[in-house]
Image (tube, grey):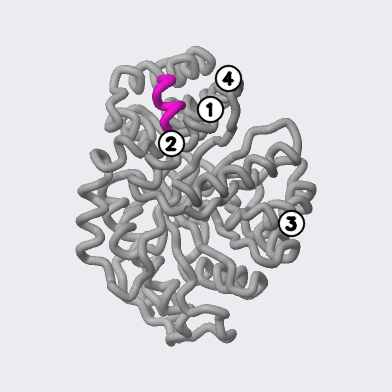
Amino acid sequence: MRIGMALTYSDGGFKQTVEELADYEKAGLDIVYVAEAYSFDAVSQLGYIAAKTERLEIASGILQLYTRTPTLMAMTAAGLDFVSDGRFTLGIGASGPQVIEGFHGVPYTAPLGRTREIIEICRKVWRRERLRHDGKHYKLPLPADQGTGLGKPLKLVNHPVRPDIPIMVAAIGPKNVELTAEIADAWEPIFYMPERAADVWGAALAAGRTRRDPGLRELDVVAQAALAIGDDVDGFLEFGRPMAALYLGGMGAKGANFYNDLARRYGFEKEAVEIQDLYLDGKKDEAAAKVPRELLEKISLVGSEGHVRERLAALKESGVTTLNVTPIAGDHKGRLALIEKVKAMAADA
């Protein structure tokens, strides 16, 4: 398993963390992810990271489908792959209507269809084809009756470092996961529980893989996990409660919260209802207290060395190929030691 680490997109210590990435490279870190929610953009920070590192792969984790045209998405990926000498992975995802319609003012429509077309367009751009695309959601060039009629089928001026930049899709819904397994290079779910992954996503992954182009890479399965190793670290699991409550309770309305739906599919139906009711009623602390301990334990790598080894084995057995960890320690030296440790343990899993 590769070991990755997420860099926060809004922390005041971003530059210091990037300066420390050279140490993480030496410790064996393989890839670093930068998110883009509704704070600073990820692209500028990824470019900064590319300039400060040599071997480390970089990835957007994630760029939202609706915030850039498909062609700009492709240009951005090609640019980041260029400045990093071929180390970039384009992570994309649909986000949700709260962010897309609330912050960007764009209708949250057809996420599946748009995902497919955006990936098709990106790959055409990177192959330097004269860009023609007659899709349901995107038409290039723009038809005459929708504009001036002067649009021309252009191709990318520059030659990309790679014509096949890896594409990672963040997905948890069955149809979206099926699409990801069919056409993407990597899949990033959230709140990944290896013991229940097959029940929740197995059929969707299998269906998508039956239609997968054999020319594509093997699907990289990217799981996120908090990381703390020791005999006195169980309390660190509590750090995950506020975020879990935010996603399960506040990221969407009733009947339109993808993360709450996932918790239900995991078997936490009662808790999912309670968390959402409390969170939407403004009782965030009470909602966080309702997050099942089992969920926190199974989506984390927090515990004794023996426990973490067991969790790593379960993740590998379920098909995970990349671990995107958040090391929890009091200082840089401690976080570095965790990366070194989990890298060695993952090699033995």
Residue span colored magenta: 292-298
Image-based side of 295 in relation to 306, left or right? left
Q: Is there CB contact under 8 Å for labels 4 and 3?
A: no
Q: Is there CB contact under 8 Å for labels 2 and 3?
A: no
> Looking at the picture, how far across and down is residue 140, in whole percent?
40, 77
> Looking at the picture, how far across and down is residue 54, in whole percent?
70, 67
Q: Amino acid at mark 2?
A: Arg
| Snapshot quadrant of residue 331 | top right
Please tell me the numbered disc located at residue 303: 1
In this view, 79 is above or below 282: below
- From mark 4 to mark 2, how far is it between C-alphas? 17 Å
Q: Is there CB contact under 8 Å for labels 1 and 2?
A: yes
| Mark closest to the chain's N terminus, 4 or 3 | 3
Which residue in the protein does label 2 denote?
Answer: 311
| Snapshot quadrant of residue 280 | top left
Image-based side of 67 in relation to 336, left or right? left
Q: Secondary structure at mark 4?
A: helix
Which residue in the protein does label 4 denote?
Answer: 235
Image-based side of 326 in relation to 315, left or right? right
Which residue in the protein does label 3 denote?
Answer: 22
In this view, 92 is above or below 333: below
Between 344 and 233, which is closer to the camera in this rendering? Answer: 344
> Looking at the picture, how far across and down is residue 40, in whole percent?
66, 49
| Mark closest to the chain's N terminus, 1 or 2 | 1
| Residue 97 visible, this angle | no
